[in-house]
């Protein structure tokens, strides 16, 4: 599985295929009354592109020619990286529409899934455990880089909290996928998940 598939589709030079987390480095913590353990076989492993409608995927795979004319580091490039064009041109630009799309795959809703991703913390408890976060397909999303499209972000809430160690590493997340718009200054998620387990990311054989 390619963890950074959406990042590649959007032309972002970020990936995490070479990223891995040592299980010894991660504190096993309780998440929504479930202790970290081996993933149950009933959870279907999915890729991020499985959550995106084909029309949005096709639009991202075929970016407009004007993007090739933007020089790296230019004013236009900076504005583009802030998704300014997505907000101002969405009415008539299919590519820009896909960048802010909240369209979901209805068949995925209420399904038990297993998906890899990076954690973007949103809220912490008094012990600095993460209680709310976005799960995203590539490292640096929402903080060092523009956020993914909303249909490529999953909002997760865990009242018991998750250790904030090793946030530079990807994780496997399992749970029941739901749909709900969750907006934050860091981005907008079109999906949410009732999480059951979390474990270090390792490549699938």
Image (cartoon, rainbow, N blue to C red):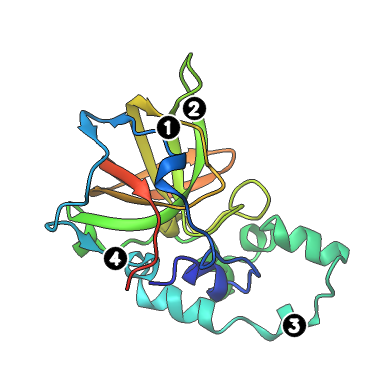
Which residue is labeled 1 in the image? 132
* Quadrant assignment for the C terminus: bottom left
Residue 106, position as x, y percentages in the image? 23, 61
- State yes or no: discs 3 and 4 in contact (Cβ < 8 Å): no
Whether the residues at callouts 1 and 4 have beta carbons within 8 Å, the answer is no
Indicate which disc residue 68 carries.
3
Tag 1 and tag 2, C-beta contact below 8 Å: yes
Q: Residues within 10 Å of mark 2 (few under 14, many from 20)?
A: few
Q: Which residue is mark 2?
A: 123
Mark 3 or mark 4, whichever is nearer to me: 4
Question: In x, y percent, where is residue 45?
Answer: 25, 63
Decide which of tag 2 and tag 4 comes sooner along the chain. 4
* Number of residue marks: 4
Left or right: where does residue 78 sit relative to residue 50?
A: right
Q: Is residue 44 above or below residue 196?
A: below
Q: Earlier in the sequence, mark 3 or mark 4?
A: 4
**Residue 181, quarter of the rendered image:** top left
In the figure, is residue 149 to the left or right of 75?
A: left
Give residue 185's position: percent from left, percent from top.
59, 38
Asked if marks 2 and 4 touch (Cβ < 8 Å), the reply is no
Up the image or down, 135 lies above or below 10; here it is above
Label 1 to label 2: alpha-carbon separation: 5 Å
In the picture, residue 55 is in which quadrant?
bottom left
Which type of secondary structure does the marked residue at label 4 adopt? Answer: loop
Considering every residue shown, the one lying at the far left of the view is 42
Looking at the image, which is closer to me, 18 or 83?
A: 18
* Quadrant occupied by the N terminus: bottom left
Instruction: State the residue at coordinates (41%, 58%).
Output: 151
Alpha-carbon span between mark 2 and mark 3: 38 Å
Mark 1 or mark 4: whose residue is earlier in sequence: 4
Front disc: 2 or 3: 2
């Amino acid at each position: 599985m390619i963890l950074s598939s959406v990042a590649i589709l959007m032309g972002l030079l970020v990936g995490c295929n070479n990223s891995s987390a040592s299980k010894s480095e991660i504190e096993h913590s309780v998440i929504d009354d479930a202790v970290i353990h081996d993933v149950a076989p009933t959870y279907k492993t999915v890729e991020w592109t499985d959550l995106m409608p084909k029309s949005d995927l096709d639009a991202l795979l075929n970016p407009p020619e004007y993007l090739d004319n933007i020089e790296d580091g230019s004013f236009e490039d900076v504005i583009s990286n802030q998704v300014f064009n997505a907000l101002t041109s969405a009415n008539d630009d299919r590519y820009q529409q896909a960048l802010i799309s909240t369209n979901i795959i209805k068949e995925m809703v209420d399904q038990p899934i297993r998906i890899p991703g990076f954690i973007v913390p949103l809220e912490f408890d008094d012990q600095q455990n993460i209680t709310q976060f976005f799960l995203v397909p590539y490292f640096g999303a929402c903080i060092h880089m523009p956020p993914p499209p909303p249909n490529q972000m999953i909002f997760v809430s865990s009242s018991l909290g998750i250790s904030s160690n090793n946030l530079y590493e990807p994780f496997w997340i399992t749970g029941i996928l739901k749909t709900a718009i969750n907006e934050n200054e860091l981005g907008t998620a079109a999906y949410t998940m009732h999480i059951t387990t979390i474990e270090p990311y390792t490549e699938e054989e």
